[in-house]
Image (cartoon, rainbow, N blue to C red):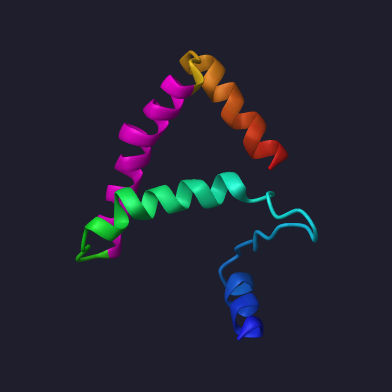
């Protein structure tokens, strides 16, 4: 099963995100975001097509999640963009 999963990732040019040994908190922010996304949006809807699902999730992130994070961090748009770039670069 693990080999199948790794092959799937490779075929689709995806990178497996795993915590380093002994560092269980490495993926905490991502786990929290995806848990919230599923709880607040995905699990409450039935999507007829993948395109509809993608559009709905994009809208959730852009119209609800990102503005909420901006308010929470009390940053201007420019500061928030710089914060996101830094967090993406450093992982």
Quarter of the figure with the N terminus:
bottom right
Dominant SS of magenta comes to helix
Look at the image and tell me in which quarter the C terminus lies: top right
Vertical relation: 47 (above or below) 41: below
Q: Nearer the viewer, residue 78 or 17?
A: 17
Left or right: 18 as drawn, with respect to 59? right
> Along the horizontal axis of the image, is 62 left or right of 76?
left
The foreground one among 82 and 22 is 22
Image vertical order of residue 9 relative to residue 38, above or below:
below
Query: Which image quarter: residue 16?
Result: bottom right
Rendered residue at 64%/72% (across/down): 10
Q: Which residues are magenta?
A: 50-72
**Residue 82: % across, % down:** 60, 22
Q: Is residue 36 magenta?
A: no
Q: Residue at x 38, y 49 (%)?
A: 37
Q: Residue furthest right?
A: 21
Residue 11, image x, y percentages? 59, 74
Question: Residue at the spot x=60%, y=48% of the render?
Answer: 28
């Amino acid at each position: 099963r693990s080999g199948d999963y790794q092959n799937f990732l490779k075929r689709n040019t995806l990178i497996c995100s795993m915590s380093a040994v002994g560092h269980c908190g490495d993926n905490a922010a991502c786990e929290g975001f995806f848990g919230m996304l599923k709880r607040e949006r995905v699990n409450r809807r039935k999507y007829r097509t993948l395109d509809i699902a993608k559009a709905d999730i994009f809208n959730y992130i852009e119209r609800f999640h990102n503005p909420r994070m901006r308010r929470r961090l009390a940053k201007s748009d420019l500061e928030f963009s710089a914060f996101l770039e830094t967090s993406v670069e450093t992982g």
